[in-house]
Structures are given as C-alpha cells and as structure tokens.
Image (cartoon, rainbow, N blue to C red):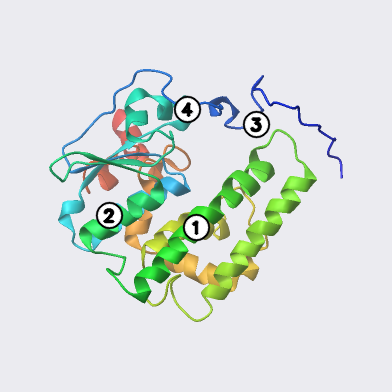
Amino acid sequence: MTDQSYTPPEVWTWQAESGGQFASINRPIAGATHDKPLREGAHPFQLYSLATPNGVKATVMFEELLEAGHSGAEYDAWPIRIGDGDQFGSGFVEINPNSKIPALLDRSGAEPLRVFESGSILMHLAEKFGAFLAPSGPQRTETLNWLFWQMGSAPYLGGGFGHFYAYAPEKWQYPIDRFTMETKRQLDVLDRQLAERPYIAGDEYTIADMAIWPWYGQLVLGRLYDAATFLDVQSYTRVMEWAERIDARPAVQRGRMVNRTFGDPAMQLHERHAAEDFETRTQDKIGEAEV
C-alpha cells in the first residue's frame, strides 16, 4: 500500500479542486451559476442530456418506443455539455435542481411536466405509453426491483470504480481494490440472474434492461473505463451474451448516438429532432458537407 494517511479536519471546508478529470465541475453547493435558457423544439418531449450511460438510458427508451410504433414518443434531444457547465445553467436547473443529466420536459399534457433522474424518466415513459413495464403484478414488481437495483448499484461502478481507476489524479490501491471488488460482485449478481432468463427481469425486454445495459453491458463490451481486461469481463459469460444481444437492437444503436459529443464522428448525433437525423446530421456527415 502506498496511500498516505489523512486525518479529516473537524469541519470540512472546500479549499481547492480535487484534481483529475471532471474536477472543475464539482462543487459542494447547488443552484444555477449563470443565466442560460434551454432551447425547445416542436415535439411533445424535450430531452436535455449527454450520451453518458445515464443519458443513454433515456435515448434508448425513446428510440425503442418509436421502433415499437409509438409515434407520440417523438422527441427533440439537446446536448448538455457537462464539461462546459451547461448543467448549471438557469434553464436546466429549473428542470433538474440536482444539475445532473438526463432531464426531460414533457409537454404532452395540459401543463409542462419536468421529469428528472433517469429511472424516473424510464418509469414515466413506460407508464405513459404502456410499454416495457407490466401494468401490475409480479412482472412489474420484478422489473422495478432491477430498475432500482441499478439506481443504487451503478454509483459504485461509476463514481467509485470508474473514478478511482480511470479519472483520479493518482492511483490509490485501497479505493481501486474496494470498488473493483464491488463491481465484480455486481457483475456476478447479474450473471447469476441471467442464468435462466434471456433478460434481466424475465422473458421480456423491459426498462430494467434499458437501465442496466448502458452501464454494465457497455462495461463488458469494453466501452467504459478501458477496464475490460482488468475486470476479466469475459468470465461473466451470461452478461456478455445479454450485452451483445441488446447491443444488436437497432433502437439501442440509435440511442447510443444521440447527444454523443465524443468518439467516432459517425456515432455522434449532437442533436436529434427527426429519424432522418441519423442519416444526415451525424458529425461525419456534417464534416463532409462543410468541406
């Protein structure tokens, strides 16, 4: 162990950024830092997000609804560039006082309704369209069990393992060991759950899969933290099979692209306003048009 001993003060005070990636956007207070109204489009649903795992949950849900024929689920998706602090703009804070993506403005009813927290967005849309969540009974309960499992577990993967393994300014053995152990335990939970069923909550694809796949599916597919070898993800064979099955869904492939501002330009659709945008407005197409 190379960690140095740290004695916490009697009262903690914020004196400086902690270092590492994303340190500049972390602060111990809430609220807006600047005036910035949100843009709005023509569709009933206005999504403000970024293609992080939590953001991908919402865009996959919208694309799955449209794929299933729910034309009322048309949406506009606007990027919230968290590295630039867009989440602290006044308009975004009005929709999500917690300043986290994704956030949704539902204008389909008599009054606009704000919906924040990715699990709440999934439930709201599932209930509104009667899709990907049973209306009652044991299947609904099992789906919600796993939806809330994800909401409680993923912070240990992202803010825990991901932070200390990939983003912290120094590599400390204790937190890496601690959160690696927990991440592998969670993968084992999923692997055992998938032993006798094709999807997380049973025989049907549900919002539980949409919540869990962007984190754990993409982790085992090698898309998060460059940690697939370190975590020996190939040993979780059922999770791998499930992850690949969902990755092949056309709606999931589209959902991954929406509000993506990094990586392969062909996978970046910064804004989404119509189905045609996937063919005409990805960053590689925009770059070609500007040449």
Q: Which residue is mark 2?
A: 125
Select label 3 or label 2 by which is in front: 2
Q: Which residue is mark 1?
A: 150
Select label 2 or label 4 by which is in front: 4
Image location (x, y in percent) of residue 110: 12, 42
Kindly give the residue lying farthest to the bottom in the view shown: 196
Q: Earlier in the sequence, mark 1 or mark 3?
A: 3
Specify the label residue 222 is tagged with. Answer: none
Residue appearing at x 44%, y 76% in the figure? 198
Classify mark 4: helix, strand or loop. Answer: loop
How much space separates mark 4 and mark 1, taking CA atoms?
25 Å
Contact? badges 4 and 1 (CB < 8 Å): no
Position of 27 compared to 38: left or right?
right
Q: Earlier in the sequence, mark 2 or mark 4?
A: 4
Contact? badges 2 and 1 (CB < 8 Å): no
* Amino acid beneath label 1: Gln
Mark 3 crowd level (few <14, some 14–19, many ≥20, 10 Å Cα): some
Q: Earlier in the sequence, mark 4 or mark 1?
A: 4
Q: Which residue is mark 3?
A: 20
* Amino acid beneath label 2: Leu
Image location (x, y in percent) of residue 267: 40, 46
